[in-house]
Image (cartoon, grey):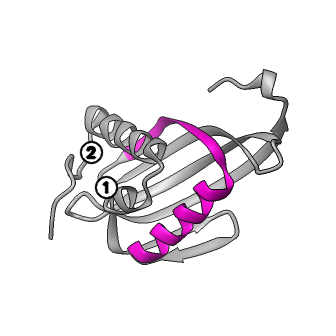
Amino acid sequence: MKKKHPLPPFNAETAAQKVQMAEDGWNSKNPEKVSMAYSPDTEWRNRNQFIKGREGVVNFLADKWNNELEYKLKKELWAFTDNKIAVRFEYEYHNKNGQWFRAYGNENWEFDENGLMKKRYASINDLAIDEKDRRL
């Protein structure tokens, strides 16, 4: 199994590095590339959706970025321990009708021994905004 450094157990530096890597990956909007940060049997809860496995991640992200246009994400390390990291985030996007949104949320991540994320639990709220109010 390929390793995705840094590996757990995390310290402040390596946890922050994992968060930045996730932010960079998601901002690439490349579902296949992003999916490689997750274990083959990864389990997600994203809002009211439950996603399993890398193929599920690819399908979810492809659909997401097909509908959430000009997506831009910012993540912030909130807490960490051993093989778990908690982040807060916000991202902005517009839908196909041109309505802009800012989404806020929290994620809890659990990593396997290879540094791959095996569990991701995301709670997210969307706020409609005017384009002039964008921050990202």
Q: Quadrant of the N terminus?
A: bottom left
Q: Earlier in the sequence, mark 1 or mark 2?
A: 2
Q: Is residue 69 magenta?
A: yes
Q: How many marks?
A: 2
Residue 90: x %, y % from top left: 63, 38
The span picked out in magenta is: 54-80
Residue 115 vs residue 100, the one in the foreground = 100
Mark 1 nearby-residue class (10 Å; few <14, some 14–19, many ≥20):
some
Q: Residue at x 53, y 74 (%)?
A: 51
Q: Quadrant of the C terminus?
A: top right
- Disc 1 marks which residue? 83
Q: Rounded to the nearest whole Å, what is the CA distance between mark 1 and mark 2?
A: 6 Å
Mark 2 and mark 1 in contact (Cβ < 8 Å)? yes
Residue 10, disc: 2
Q: Quadrant of residue 111?
A: bottom left
- The secondary structure type at the circle numbered 1 is loop
- The secondary structure type at the circle numbered 2 is loop
